[in-house]
Amino acid sequence: MSVLVFADSSEGKFKKTAFEVVSYGKKVAEELGTNLVALTINGGDASELYAFGAEKVLEVKNDLSTFNAKAYASIINQAADAQSANVVVIDSSVDGLYVAPMVAVAMDAGYASNVVALPSSTAPFTVKRKAFSNKAFSNTIVSTEKKVIGIAKNSYGAHENAVSGTAEAFSANVPEMGVKSESVDKATGVITIADADIVVSAGRGLKGPENWGMVEELASVLGAATACSKPVSDLGWRPHSEHVGQTGKPVASNLYIAIGISGAIQHLAGINASKVKVVINTDPEAPFFKAADYGIVGDAFEFVPQLIEKLKAFKQA
Ligand SMILES: Cc1cc2nc3c(=O)[nH]c(=O)nc-3n(C[C@H](O)[C@H](O)[C@H](O)COP(=O)(O)OP(=O)(O)OC[C@H]3O[C@@H](n4cnc5c(N)ncnc54)[C@H](O)[C@@H]3O)c2cc1C
């Protein structure tokens, strides 16, 4: 018996969630008194995973240049089989939410997605999950012998726990995929909302697209991604890829700065998983202040340029 984690990567580099998944898997393995195995598919340097507790890393190298859910699910299942893994941990990213149920079906396992904490008990195996757009939690018992656990980004965190690991090649059959991406055109030089530690987001309070220069500048100084509220993208001020909320992208960043956004429930539904929320709004009654960790009652056109200057000075000091 072992715990298997899938350490996801992109273009040969581990995603941040890979370290979180390994950290989580390591703790679960310790609680179950077993060992942790990490699986990578065209991933990064295995030693990066040893640092978070992966004693054994199975490396799949093949010509899958882009993500394919069916292929990934099959490879994860083959690795789980080979390692006699009873627990498989996968992140609950968009890709992870696609792959994990397929793995669960192949393993005849119970699946809990969006898990936010270590199991409160391993017998019965009980996990806490996000529900209703982060407005509630459910405690879920996974009663099957085999389990697939999907952990929510930024919920457990990456914890260094160095072990002297070993890496070995794992050759897995890649099934007939049915669909194949011919090419992927990625925006370059832009931090995506999904990968960002910091997100600078703005709403209709900014009056028009011509005022987004200060938002982009603040994001650039902070190394952040830019985002917006729904009306802003509906109005064509910003691309739809930046729309955050219930009907847009979810954000689970460490810091979310909301400028001129009222904090409607549909917006908050998408950003609840962010750790620290800072709001800048002229209206002290704006609902966002109730959800914020820090609030600035003030005019964005006065405050944001000053914040940028202060941050630049701080970085140069
Ligand atoms: C089914 C449904 C789904 C929806 N899904 C989403 C979603 O996914 N995401 C989303 O964002 N919305 C969504 N909405 C819309 C949502 O209800 C709100 O209408 C929207 O979030 C409001 O956007 P806003 O805060 O940018 O604009 P507004 O509500 O117009 O708020 C602008 C804010 O800016 C402040 N302000 C004005 N001037 C300044 C200034 N100079 N400096 C600082 N602050 C200033 C104002 O005080 C105000 O609080 C959805 C609505 C429905 C019905």
Image (cartoon, rainbow, N blue to C red):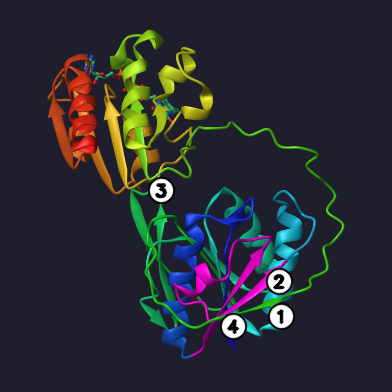
Which residue position holds label 4? 145
- Residue depicted at 68% across the width and 70% down the height: 59
Q: Are marks 4 and 1 in contact (CB under 8 Å)?
A: no
Which is in the foreground here, disc 1 or disc 3?
A: 1
Q: Quadrant of ligand 1?
A: top left
Residue bounds of the magenta highlight: 34-60
* Side of 135 relative to 10 (left or right): left
Q: Residues within 10 Å of mark 3 (few under 14, many from 20)?
A: few
Which residue position holds label 2? 77
Looking at the image, is mark 4 or mark 1 earlier in the sequence?
A: 1
Residue 52 x/y as whole percent = 44, 72
Report the disc number at residue 31: none
Which is in the foreground here, disc 4 or disc 1?
A: 1
Query: In the image, is residue 50 above or below residue 310?
Result: below
Residue 222 x/y as whole percent = 32, 36
Real-space Cα separation, disc 1 to disc 3, in angstroms: 34 Å
